[in-house]
Amino acid sequence: MLDVKDVTVRFAGLTALDGVSFTVRPGTVHAVIGPNGAGKSTCFNVLSGVYRATSGSVRFGDAELTALAPHRIAALGVARTFQNIALSRHLPVLDNLMLGRHRLTRAGFVSAGLRLPSARAEAALHRARAAEIAEFVGIGDRLGTPVGLLPYGVQKRVELARALCMEPRLLLLDEPVAGMTGGEREEIAELVVAVRESLGISVVLVEHDMGVVMRLADRVTVLDFGRRIADGTPEEVQADPAVIRAYLGTSANGEHA
């Protein structure tokens, strides 16, 4: 279970998150939503160790994450994708996926450098697993293609596959369908469902597409100006007056702007 409790983040006097709390139960999809500037990206950066919370606690199972570096958090089984694609564009798909296997590699630097039999055997196993994951996300026929030559929607699949190559227990998806066509969004939504149901991975999702959020999420946390204004099922959140005001705005006479 991921337990975020009273997390506050301040930057030079600016409060980006203000006492935010929510819980992600194992094997569920939990969405974090809100208008632009609500603090969603800051929240993700705290969960993955890019930012350190000013106060509060983030616990994943028995581990406290708030003082850990990103690579230590990744080693605990937390993987993420990014709003802006963060892949090595000149490398083929398989090499990008192998970057996700790095934390699972047991062969030492010397063994790998000398291409000792044990290192070669381990590398072959990792390549086979990467190819299996590529098939799972629908890019099995693109392993030899440089990422930069792939359409945008396929690149987003590669990034998801690389995160899955880390064999995570918790997957952080930062706007996974942003910039996609309607058909691509539907396919990625189905893929997220498969990740949860087939692999049993917990998912935290930041996404602006409310159709995708309402379809995928078991629970939704809504942020506005760094504060949590709602938390509940998609149906509860959708009907919450505070959420409606945050997204639509309200005029002086109480009517929606």
Image (cartoon, rainbow, N blue to C red):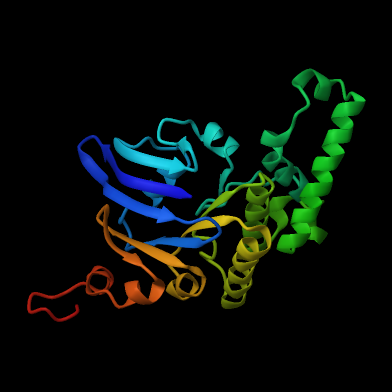
Q: Nearer the viewer, residue 208 or 233?
A: 233
In the image as oriented, which residue stretches furthest toward the front? Answer: 62
Q: In this view, does 45 lie to the left or right of 102?
A: left
Instruction: Please give the name of the residue rendered at 82% of the width and 44% of the height, measured from the top-left corner.
Output: 127
| Residue 248 percent across, percent down from the top left | 25, 74
Q: Going 54% across and 65% down the picture, which residue do you hit?
A: 177
Image quadrant where one finds the C terminus = bottom left
Residue occupying the point 43% across, 41% down: 59
Q: Where is residue 162 in the image (x, y as percent from the top left)?
A: 67, 49
Q: Which of 176 and 101 is in front in this view?
A: 101
Look at 92% across and 27% down and name the residue there.
Answer: 117
Q: Where 50 falls versus 241 (above or below)?
A: above
Q: Who is closer to the viewer here, 183 or 212? A: 212
**214, above or below 126, in the image:** below
In the drawing, does residue 165 fall left or right of residue 48?
A: right
In the image as oriented, which residue stretches furthest toward the bottom? 255
Above or below, comparing residue 59 to residue 153 in the picture: above
Return the x and y of residue 32 as percentages of the image width and height: 40, 59
Position of 31 compared to 251: left or right? right
**Outermost residue, right direction?**
117
Residue 104 occupies quadrant: top right
